[in-house]
Structure formats: structure tokens, C-alpha cells
Image: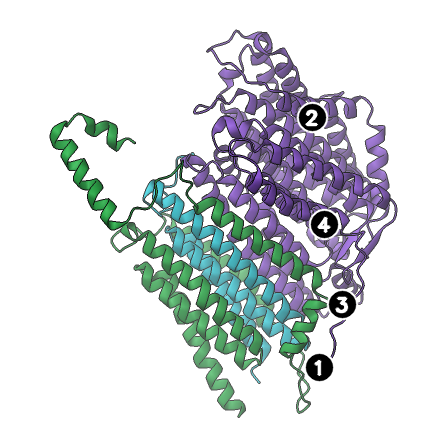
Chain colours: A green, B purple, C cyan
Amino acid sequence: MNILIMVIFVVLAAFTLAAGVMVVTVKNIIHAALWLIASFFSVAAMYLLMEAEFIAIVQVLVYVGAISILVLFAIMLTRHVTGEGVRQLYKRWWIALIVAAALFGVLIVPTVFNYEWAVQPSGAQISIASTVEIGTAFMREYLLPFEVASVLLLVALIGAIVIAFEERSTRRRVLTLAEEVEQRRQRNESLRLAPTTHASETSE
Amino acid sequence: MPDIQIPSIDLGVSLQLLIIFGGAMVLLLADLFSGEGNKRIVGYIALLFVVGAAAAGVPYWDAPRSTFNGMLVLDNFALTLNWIFLLSTAITILISLEYLPRQGIERGEYYALLLFALGGMMLLAQGTDLIVLFLGLELLSITLYVLAGFAYPRLSSEEAAMKYLLIGAFAAGFLVFGIALLYGATGTSSLAGIANKLGSGLAADDVAFMLAGAALVIIGFGYKISMAPFHMWTPDVYEGSPTPVAAFMSVGTKGAGFAALARLLLVALGSQYATWGLILAILAAVTMVIGNVSAVAQTNVKRMLAYSSIGHAGYILMGVLSAGSPAAANRGIEGFLFYLLAYSLTNLGAFAVLIALEQRGEAAWSLDDFAGLWHRQPFLAIAMALCMFSLAGVPPTAGFWGKFYVFTAAWEAGLQWLAVVGVITSAIAAFFYLRIIVQMFMRDPVREISPSLDRNLMIGVGLAALGVIVFGISPTPVIDLVQGSVLALSR
Amino acid sequence: MVPVSYYVLLSAVLFTLGVVGVLTRRNALIVFMSVEMMLNSANLALVAFAQRWQSANGQILVFFVITVAAAEVAVGLALLVTIFRSKRTTDIDEINTLKG
């Protein structure tokens, strides 16, 4: 049983890391987003392996279901320039690599590798936080962060609207296809009639 | 199915927060019902809430208590910080009232967002749990991303928001991983709990873990307070953001970030002063040097103020880290609070003068635009001169006492070299502050600019300048205030 | 059971990968994804530590981190799309009206 779990863990870990490497290195941004989803999924599987089922579900719902989809939407909305062929890396990417390697080497590796973990009580039933326990904690010990999180979400909601919402007076309305065709026809006509109006129109 | 019993909550502790958050919701509604092109009314209501929240804190002076399972405290330290934040927000609202319509970016959500940001700052001052600090910081940051991009038809504003957002998200990553490591080492996320664990002795391995986590958390906060070497974003973001927002950021994020950092360092990691003291002292010195030396080369006053705010982060950090040393524990906190108050007033005043010079569509931020201001707008010139003197630390202004305080704190903490670096960099800084004063009083106007000085802006500038000079001449009330604030910071 | 240290090590590697992504890639969207990976790795570490301490606290912290990540992404992508509308690029080096 233990060996089976170990094997599952190793496979998942390898997959997570591979997906992570792909996110950071692939050229095509849609592929990067899909690899990101894959890495989220395998992390969710790891939560299940640690018997944190509530977090695993939330991970799938929020990260895969909401965040990744939002990212994909953003890619679609900005797709003209996000394809392959543009320069992808900073000119001095190797400096960044050194910084990251230093961060990893100096800060994290020694602490994790040299660590002697307290051996868990073998045989004893390990109590794992159940969903009920987590729910109760939200209403008791963690009431304040819970409330603040709701305010945070409200702010994000308002913020996204303030940024992206186009007011009638200040921004162009999104046109339907018929209107767009009509507008183009009119523009072509006006161009044919009076080429000089062209400049004023495009600068609008 | 057991009943969930919500523990009894002392609402007094969160009263100010409740007023501010509730006020923000009311503002959203008020915005809905106020007519197009007349959003000032929303701003006035916001002012009412800010004043109300400030008054609501008075009965809690000298009555420290905590609630929400010890996650939120209201001691004198937090209360003083709250008052400083409320004052900064009030001035920010005053200087925004006419700026927004003039720039054609007036929308009622602006004031609601300002109050949300203020709530985040107050959470940072009052929170005693890493998760509350994290949520407070994110609440503040997310609001500021939106506010930085508020002038959105202007590309520079959008870019500033984007830059700030990418850097902020990156910093949040460090912060969260740091919190994870701290939790892993100690098994708790409460600051007092961490202090207890450290006091009772951790295994050597756990200490290494804890230090790695603390380093990452400090990096995360370092971005927010623009401490070198994490300061690079500051000038770009300040320059691109709408000017009142830049003013708010320069005092708000910094103050709140330092408040949380102070609590974290002094309450949770106080026993580890030997480890972080020297590192932070070096970083503070680097911050002061980089900020002030880069500011010398600037001819754009807004960018110059941004660089100088980096330098001031170094001075504030000096106060905070001195408080870690037992020899200067009280003096450091006093210095930090006094400096923060002086710096907030002064910087808001300076930015407000920039706002008066800023016309729609063109910005008069170059040094030449200040030439001869004395002849055109004596009031603005005097206010600006006072602010510059205060930033430079010339007596008798509030800035002088702030500097005096933090330098003595560093000296008493045994960091004489740091105090010397501080004095030298202040001398460098005096050069570019005085250059503006010379421009204003001794040169003739280079080009025609008509500063627009309305009543609200005048009150804002006047309030800031008055505070700078009054607290400079008789600092006793403030000193009493900050001395009272020290006692309650449990250690 | 898989030892907790394995999870922590894995999360550290993931975190570093995220940092590399942020520092080397120029596309704002990929930078975003890298940041999400950093947050995700922190979550993994938190859940692992929750197992170590046998308490629900770590898992609850994860919940809040996920909330914040969602909020940040909502605002961030809204900004990104707006800036793209006015500038037609998501390359952060070309977002340079402001001299850096």
C-alpha cells in the first residue's frame, strides 16, 4: 500500500514538474495555459493523496474552473500578438536564472534537505481535517479572515468592472456584425467621396 | 449536526474598520443615486465617514484589547497608526475632489475604493495573525492596482497599473511562500504564537526554516515599502498614476507595510533581532543612498518625489529596526510613528502642490515649471517650501523632529554608522529639495502656467502645511501621542 | 504515507520555477501564469505542513490564498485586456511610456 502511494506520488510529482517546466518554456501561450491547467490538476491530485479533499475540490473549481478559463479568455481577447515568432525572453534572461538559482540554492535547498522530520506516529490513526472541521473553523477561529476575504472579493468585482467596463460616453460600444458591416460600407463610401476626411476619422 | 456557535466578538475593536467598510458600501449606493457629473457629494460623504472613524477611536485610547480569537487588536500603537492613515486619506480625498473632474476621470467608485484601501491599511495596523496581514495587504494592493489605472484613457496610467500589478503579484507570491514556511516551522500563523514557539526553543532545523520563511516574508513586504533592492517599480508607478493616487500610495502603502512589518519583526521575531537586525540595517542604508542619490539627477519633480520617497523608506526602516534592539526599543517605535506622521503630511502636501500645477492634458512637473511660483501663487510656494524643508529635515519642521528621532534611536541601538549614513544622505537630499525652493523664489517664470487652486485643494494643502509647521514648532503633543503608543506594543 | 519533506521539496522546486518564469518571460500573461504557479506551490507546502502539524489551520490558509489569487487574476486580466485594447501588445517590455 505504502509503495503504491509512493509510486503515485512520484508519478504525480514528475508530471507536475514537467508541466511547470512547460509553462515557463513553451513559446505558444495557449499551450502554456493548457500546461498550467495540467499542473493545477496534478497538484489537486496530490491534495487528495494528502487526504485534503476539500482543498482538492476547491483547487479544481477555482484554479482550473475559473482562473485558467479567465486566462484562456484573456489569451483569446489578445490573440493577435501572443502567437509564436515574437521574442519571448528578456535579453538578460541568464541573470534572472542566476537569481532564481541563488534563491533556490541558498534559501530553500539547505533548509529542506538538511531537515530531519519528526517521525510521524506509525500505526496511530492520523486525524485529518474534515470538511466539517474546516467549515466550523471558518465560523469560529477564522471568522475575521473569512469576512475580510468577502470584502476582498467585492473589491475585485468592483475593480474589474471599473477597469473593463466601457462607459457609453467615453468608449466605443461593441458593435454587432451587421452594424460593423454597415459602418465599413459607409466609411468606404466616404473615403471614395472625400479622401481628405480619412485622417480625421482614423485619429478619432 | 452540532450547532456552530459563533464566539462572542468585541465589536469595539473593529469599530473603526466597520465604519470604513460600511462607509464604502454606502458610498457605492450613494454613487448610484448621485447625478452624473456631480460625484463630489460622494467624496464629501466619504470625508464624513473618515472623520467619524477617527472620532470612534478616541474612547479606546489606553484600553488595549483584542478580539476575533486574538487576530485583531486595538492597542495604542494600532490606534495611532489608524489615525495617521485616516488623516492621510482625508487629505487625499480633499485633494482629489477637484482633480478628478478636471482630468475627466470623475467616478464615484473612486472614493469607495479609497475607503476599501484604507480598511486594508487599518487591518495591517491591527492584525496580529499572518493571514490577516496577508489579506489586509492584498485588499490594499488590489484596490491600488485599480486606482493606479483609474485615469484609464491615459496610457501611462494603465501602464503604471499593469507594472504595479505584476510586481505586486510577484511580491505576494514571496509573501505566501514565506508564510507557508513560517507556518511549517512553528505550526501557527499567529504572531504571538510564533513568538511563543521561538521562546520555548525550536529545533535547529526548524529555526533554519523559520528564518527562510521570515526572509521571504520580508522580501514580500520589501516590495510594498519600496525597500532597496526591491524599489525599482516605484518611480514608474508613481509617475503614471493619477497624482492623488500616487500621493496616497506613497504614504499609505508605505505606512501600512511598515506597520505590519514592525509588528511582525518586533512581536513575532523579536527574539531573532541578532539575525535580522544587521541585514535590515544594511538594506536601510542602501535604500537611503539609492533613493537620495537617484533623486539628485531628476528634473521631473514627480519622479524626484518618488525617488525621495524611497529614501524616506530607508529612514522609516531605521526606526523600525532600531526598535528591535532592547536598548532602543521604545525610542525606535516612537521614531517610526513620528517619522511616519511627519512624512505623510509632508508628502501629501508636496503632491497636492503638483496637483495644483497639473492641467488637463499636460503636466507641469518639470523643475522649470516651478520657477517663479512665488510671484504667481505665494500660498502654493510657501506650502511647497515648507514641505521641502520638512522632507530635507530642516528645523523647525516636523520632518526635522522625525529625522532627529530615528537618528537617535539608531544611535542608541548601537548602529552609529547607520545614523551617520542617514545624516550624510540627508545632506545629499537637501540639495534637490532646496533646488526647488530656489526655483520658486529666485527665478522668473519660464513659461506661463496658471495653477488651479480651488477651495478643497487649498484646505488639503493648508492642512498638510499647517501640520508640518505646527508639529515642527511644538512637537510635544505628537511626542506624547507616540510615547503613549509604545507601551502597549506587547513584546 | 509520503514523507512531508517530499512535498515541501516539490513545492520549493515549483516555486523556483515560477520565479524563473516571472523573471525571464516577457509576455504579461505568462508572467501571470508563473505567479499563479508560485501561489500554487505555496498552497502545496501549506497543505503538507498541515499534515505535519495535524491541524486544519494550514488547509484554511490555503483557502484564503486561493481566494486572493482569484481576486488578483480578475483584476489583472481586466487590466491586461484594457491595456491591450489601447496598445495592442502584452509584451511588458513595450509597456514603456514611462522611463524605467
Q: Residue furthest left?
A: A192
User: For mark 1, does the 10 Å Cα neighbourhood hold few (<14), some (14 to 19), or many (20 or more) residues?
Assistant: few
Relative height, residue C2 to residue C11 (above, below): below
The residue at which mark 4 appears reads as B18
Q: Earlier in the sequence, mark 3 or mark 4?
A: 3
Select label 2 or label 3 by which is in front. Answer: 3
The CA distance from mark 4 to mark 2 is 27 Å
The amino acid type found where label 1 is placed reads Met
Which quadrant would residue B77 be assigned to in this image?
top right
The residue at which mark 2 appears reads as B464
Image disc number at residue B6: 3
The amino acid type found where label 2 is placed reads Ala
User: For mark 3, does the 10 Å Cα neighbourhood hold few (<14), some (14 to 19), or many (20 or more) residues?
Assistant: few
The amino acid type found where label 3 is placed reads Ile
User: For mark 2, does the 10 Å Cα neighbourhood hold few (<14), some (14 to 19), or many (20 or more) residues?
Assistant: many
Secondary element at image label 2? helix
Q: Earlier in the sequence, mark 1 or mark 2?
A: 1
